[in-house]
Image (spheres, rainbow, N blue to C red):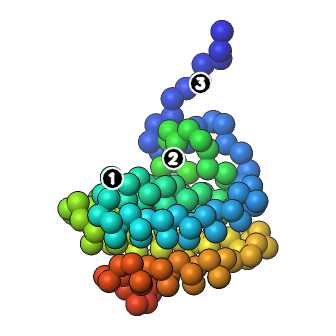
C-alpha cells in the first residue's frame, strides 16, 4: 500500500519539494525563447487551441524561473503551486491567465506579459547561478516575432 500524502491547499505547497536545479534553469532560459517562436507561428496561423497550449507551456517555464529564484525546483505535481510564490509573484502570473477574447491579439498580449515576467527573473537567475543568458536565441525569436506578427511591439519595457 502506498503512503498517503496530504493534499495541499492553494497556499500550501506539496511536501515533495527539491532544491533548484541550475541545469534545469539554464535549459529553461533557452526553451522559453524557442517556445515563444513556436507560439508566434501558431498565433499567425490563427491556430487558437495550439496557441493556448503553447502559452500555457510558456507560463510553466516562467513558473520554473519564479520558483527557481525562490530556491526550489518546480515540482511536476503543481498542487499547491501558489504556496511556492509570494503575493506579488502570484499576482503577476495570474494576470497572464485570462484572454479577453479568442484572437491573435489576446495571445500576443499574454505572450508580451510573459516576456516581461521572464525578463525580470532571467537576469537574476543568470547572476545567482552563474548561467549563460541566451542572447542569440532571444534575438532570433524577437526577429521572427516581428516578421510573423504585425502587432508584436517593437520594444518591450517594464516599469
> Which residue position is annotated with label 3?
5
- The quarter of the image holding the C terminus is bottom left
The count of marks equals 3
Extreme-bottom residue of the structure: 154
- The residue sitting at 44% across, 57% down in the picture is 54
Disc 2 to disc 1, C-alpha distance: 24 Å
Query: Label 2 belongs to which residue?
Result: 81
Quadrant position of residue 156: bottom left
**Which residue is the extreme one toward the top?**
1
Q: Indicate the position of residue 50 as horizontal and vertical percent values.
A: 38, 54
* Mark 1 residue element: helix
Say what secondary structure mark 2 lies in: helix
Quadrant of the image containing the N terminus: top right
Q: Residue furthest right?
A: 130
> Residue under circle 1?
49
Q: CA distance from mark 3 to mark 1?
A: 34 Å
Amino acid at each position: 500500500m502506498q503512503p498517503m500524502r496530504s493534499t495541499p491547499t492553494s497556499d500550501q505547497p506539496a511536501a515533495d519539494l527539491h532544491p533548484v536545479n541550475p541545469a534545469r534553469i539554464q535549459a529553461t532560459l533557452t526553451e522559453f525563447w524557442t517556445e515563444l517562436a513556436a507560439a508566434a507561428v501558431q498565433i499567425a496561423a490563427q491556430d487558437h487551441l495550439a496557441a493556448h497550449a503553447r502559452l500555457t507551456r510558456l507560463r510553466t517555464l516562467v513558473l520554473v524561473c519564479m520558483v527557481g529564484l525562490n530556491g526550489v525546483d518546480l515540482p511536476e505535481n503543481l498542487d499547491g503551486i501558489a504556496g511556492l510564490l509570494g503575493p506579488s509573484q502570484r499576482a503577476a502570473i495570474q494576470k497572464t491567465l485570462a484572454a479577453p477574447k479568442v484572437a491573435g491579439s489576446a495571445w500576443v498580449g499574454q505572450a508580451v506579459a510573459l516576456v516581461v515576467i521572464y525578463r525580470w527573473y532571467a537576469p537574476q537567475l543568470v547572476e545567482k547561478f552563474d548561467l549563460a543568458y541566451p542572447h542569440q536565441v532571444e534575438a532570433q525569436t524577437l526577429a521572427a516575432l516581428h516578421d510573423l506578427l504585425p502587432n508584436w511591439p517593437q520594444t518591450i519595457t517594464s516599469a
